[in-house]
Image (cartoon, helix red, strand yellow):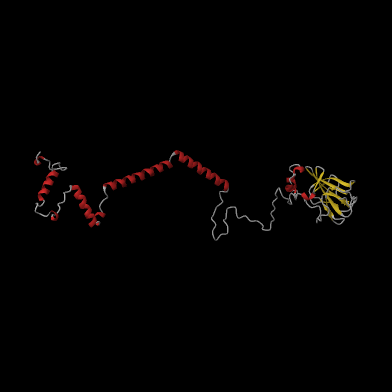
Amino acid sequence: MSESGLPRHGRRSAVQPLNDAVRQRSALPDASTDISMATPVPLPLRPRDAARRARQRVEVARPELFAALPAAPAERGRRRAAAVATQRSSLTSLTSLTSPKVLQRTGIGLAAASLALAVLIPSAGASIAPASSTTPMAQSGSGPVSADPGVELSFSRPNSTSSMDPDGKLHQALSVSAAKVAPAAAKGSLSAPLTKLVPSSPFGYRVNPLTGAMGELHTGQDFAIACGTDVYAAAGGTVTFAGWHSGGGGNRVVVDHGNGLSTSYNHNSSLLVKVGQKVERGDKVALSGTTGASTGCHLHFEVMINDKTVDPMGWL
């Protein structure tokens, strides 16, 4: 194939590199010429490579010429794809918000909120205004609520004694049988039978002060007090005994507090109650004395559970 038969357009043919090499070889100096001093001949570039290098040289030398030029096709394609993705996400969000299920749930939530507001604010005429620095409190349609600062507030707790229920703690302790009441629950459930307690002879075994017998059980707690002093009921109940006690208690009063618990008051000079009478905590039941098996004025106080005496100090 001759060079004249090759096409003159399009990509370079296979023969073109050979012709270029022949031209370059003919341009080289002869053998007598110093090869080191010869100027190297650069290889020719393809037209698109030469254009790209020329554009790069111009961009480096004059960057302001390319600042206002439109973006490259690839950059324009990326921007267009990003805009389409944004539009699709917006349409998806709008579609999800306007779907029947979402609208139904939104309607149910708004209805529940309206019902809650109607319950909390029953008066339609009431207005809610935010508190400001000029008004001490928010005004409503019903007007401000005021209270007398001198009013006394009382709170009754089931495990304590109050003016409304003085036997509150005792009633709580006696919710079960008195024999099953724990010491912590029993402590403090009975009031003092005297205004001032001065313990003398405790509950337990001792020497009998009258006979001198050893190992006698002292069935109560003695409190030293002058004769004729008021004796009070330790808790509310019913008087089951009021009279002379032949076992040495002298003038004796017994009050039944229910559920197996009762108290007795002994050696009194006189009795102020009768059998079957209802008494409250703190009511006078007798006057102290030294009747019966006694060596002096004092009160012999007993606590009985199912008619069996226990240490009274565990209940006072």
Query: Quick check: 111 left or right of 21?
Result: right
Q: Looking at this view, is 253 or 205 the one in front?
A: 205
Q: Residue furthest front?
A: 32
Is residue 168 in sight in this rendering?
no
Q: Looking at this view, is 34 or 243 the one in front?
A: 34
Q: Position of residue 274 (x, y in %)?
A: 86, 47
How many numbered discs sit on the rendered protein? 0
Q: Residue at x 11, y 48 (%)?
A: 25
For the N terminus, the quadrant is top left
Q: Residue furthest bottom?
A: 134
Q: Residue at x 21, y 51 (%)?
A: 53
Q: Position of residue 284 (x, y in %)?
A: 83, 52
Q: Residue at x 14, y 55 (%)?
A: 36
Query: Quick check: 60 left or right of 25?
Result: right
Q: Position of residue 101 (x, y in %)?
A: 46, 38
Is residue 116 in sight in this rendering?
yes
Quarter of the figure with residue 116 = top right
Q: Looking at this view, is 7 or 207 the one in front?
A: 207
Query: Quick check: 90 left or right of 181?
Result: left
Query: Quick check: 31 left or right of 61?
Result: left
Residue 149 vertical placement versus 89 (above, below): below
Q: Position of residue 244 (x, y in %)?
A: 90, 47
